[in-house]
Image: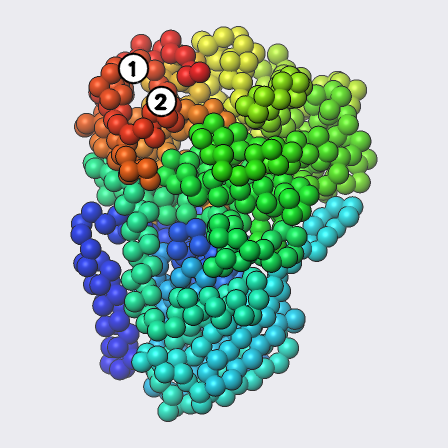
Amino acid sequence: MNQVVKKLGAFVFLSFFTFATSFSQEDNTKYIDPTIGNVVPFLVPTYPTMHLPNQMMRMFPVKEDYLSDQVEAFPMQVISHRRAGILQMKVSVGEITKSSWNQKMNIDHDLEVYHPWLYSTYLIDDDIRVSFAPGEKCAIYKIDFADKDKKNLLIKGSNEMKSTLNGGIFTFKEKTGETTKGLDPKKMTVTAFVYGELRDTDNNLIKNALIDIEKGKFSVTFSKSSPTSILVKYAVSYVSPEQAKINFEKELTKTSFNDFATTGKKAWEKVMNQIEVKGGTEAQRRTFYTSLYRTYERMVDINEYGKYYGYDGKVHESKRPFYGDDWIWDTYRAQHPLRTILNPQMENDILNSYTLMYEQSGWMPTFPQVFGNHMCMNSYHTSAIFIDGYRKGLKDYNVETAYEGLKKNLMEGTFIPWRQGTPRRPIDDFYHTNGFFPGLHPGEIETEPQMDSFEKRQAVAVSLGISYDFWTLAELAKELDKKEEYKLFAKKGNDYKNLWHPVRRLFMPKDDKGNWIDIDPKSAGGRGYREYYDENNGWTYAWDVQHDIDGLTDLLGGKKPAEDRLDQLFREPLGMKKNDFYVNGSNSTGMVGQFSMGNEPSFHIPYLYNYFGAPWKTQKRTRFLLDVWYKDNIFGMPGDEDGGGMTAFVVFTSMGLYPVTPGLPFYDITSPVFEEITINLTNGKTFTVRAKGASRTKKYIQSAFVNGEEINSPFITHSQIMAGGTLELILDELPKKEWGKDAKVPE
């Protein structure tokens, strides 16, 4: 057998043995499988990302998805979620030719090792094992070559990339970013500075390598006399090349690869073991803890030991974390609320970061990247995380400045999709006057030059989303005792009613004359139904009124008609063949009737039975949806996971809780997957959900107790959770239809 294969096999075995046996059985990191969801029917799979919790250094092997047995490159840094990364590295043996730069690296899936703190793969053609361990601002690649002449590292960047190698020490300077769309496009960039060292496993610099640098390309060739195991140790900075070296010295000076990986594992133990579960199946624990792992991919702290690159393109000094990389449209629903429980200080720092971004850029961002606000999706849901955090006691930032930025978004910004943070247009004046975003009749020519040719008007989705945003702004105005502004914005929170079609019993588009646009709400609007809705059809958006469920109930004719209509959602046929449906409906995945489990606007919908007098149906639906759509395998994600947006739903729902309305400090109760869930709160207290005998069949709540006191309500407040204690649920196999039937939401 090839000696390198023996050596590398021993390495893999040692890695598994070390990380699997050196900790107690209660170590929940053993349930994390980064490959879960790496293949999806449509759109984007999950990525097996290696990183520390909420830290800026990230990596995943660049390939199409898990099914591919070829890796295109190993990036040195992933700047933003789901981007392919910068400074993409290949490894090879033999002569470097022109084709070497485009050559893919063949792997064997069964020889891959995936942990959040450690990745390793075997390149089957060249007898090379590539391993990676991330730190906070640093990382280490460990390359184990066969004992051959000419062992190569090839790193490819943009044409603007600058690089050096001197005495085993290398540097890179690489710029990345994006150009906004619309009438006034702007180029937003950030420069990544890299300081690194090539060392052997005894931590000696490797100084005798041959280097070749040309435009956008950097290659290093090691001779046969060089070590077969090479460490690529490096730090990344968005501040300066000097700061990159400081970051290196803070984390990597004398650190071995194994020590670095062990430290990373301990960081993951800390957050995974914050929630302890008992009961359930091993598959459910794998799904749960892998979902929890994904909620820690974003946001990321880009403060580099006292300095960070800000939204004004300047370097700022601060001892406080500065967080970037978020997609509010996805994450306000569950990921941010989850953080208010698990790490309220971090959420406080995130709110402070958003506020600083507004001060530095002039707009409150909605999809903040490292280099600026990525204009994406519709509406301005940033106000949701502020009112939700404020009402949960998170106020350690300039609240008045934040309010000013949120108000500017809604009063001075455009509502045109994918144009957030650009000035108000005449079509927005129409919204402010008439209370809805006007749509176009099928075939009608677009007249607004700022409108995106693919994303379209999304007229109903925008109207409903902005109504919610005005409600959140009104609620924050009320908290800040701004009485007149509260009255103004609260009224705008009712704008959604202007598009309610009483016959269709759906939200339907109107034109700029106030006339209904006659469409099929199941299928109209082109790709993703974007002319009128967004990624989901009218049956999903019929429930997109999280902030006024009482008002929606009235529109539906009362609780019983609302309950019946919700039943119909889960049973209503597509009305066409599946292959026809997915021509335009590929975003609407995980279908149950007209309900789409694979897209964010649906997450709160199964919980609405709690408000309609039938909590037992929430218990039935949520357990069914988890069981059907969230499996512990490569197909185990029904749609775009969006960096914690979807998996936060899994974490909450598995625990028997969910925040239906971010901005109201309470959670809906449903049937938990596990018999016992204990959250170790950062305030030193513990909150436990106990549901003895919970199983696939034993899921219906018969009675409930908070700290021994019986409740007849499917709701629990944030303050009750944070005070510590126990929510005890008595379950049985048949529903108790009276439990929680007449409950009122907490005030």
Give the residue at mark 1. Answer: 711
In-front residue for pair 725/213: 725
Indicate the position of residue 45 as horizontal and vertical percent values.
46, 49
Q: Residues within 10 Å of mark 2 (few under 14, many from 20)?
A: many
Query: Residue shown at 47%/56% (left/top)?
Result: 56
Earlier in the chain: of badge 1 and badge 2, it is 1
Q: What secondary structure is marked by label 1?
A: strand
Mark 1 and mark 2: Cα distance apart in space: 9 Å
Q: Position of residue 685 (x, y in %)?
A: 28, 34
Task: Please tell me the numbered disc located at residue 716.
Answer: 2
The amino acid on which the numbered mark 2 sits, given as a three-letter code, is: Ile
Q: Residue at x 70, y 56 (%)?
A: 187
Residue at 27% x, 45% y is 273
Residue 84 appears in the figure: no
Please tell me which residue lies in front, 172 or 530.
172
User: At 33% across and 54% down in the image, what residue appears?
Assistant: 267
Q: Which residue is more in the foreground, 81 or 601?
A: 81
The reply to whether the C-beta atoms of the residues labelled 1 and 2 are less than 8 Å apart is yes
Is residue 746 visible to us here?
Answer: yes
Q: Secondary structure at mark 2?
A: strand
Looking at the image, residue 626 sits to the left or right of residue 546; the answer is left
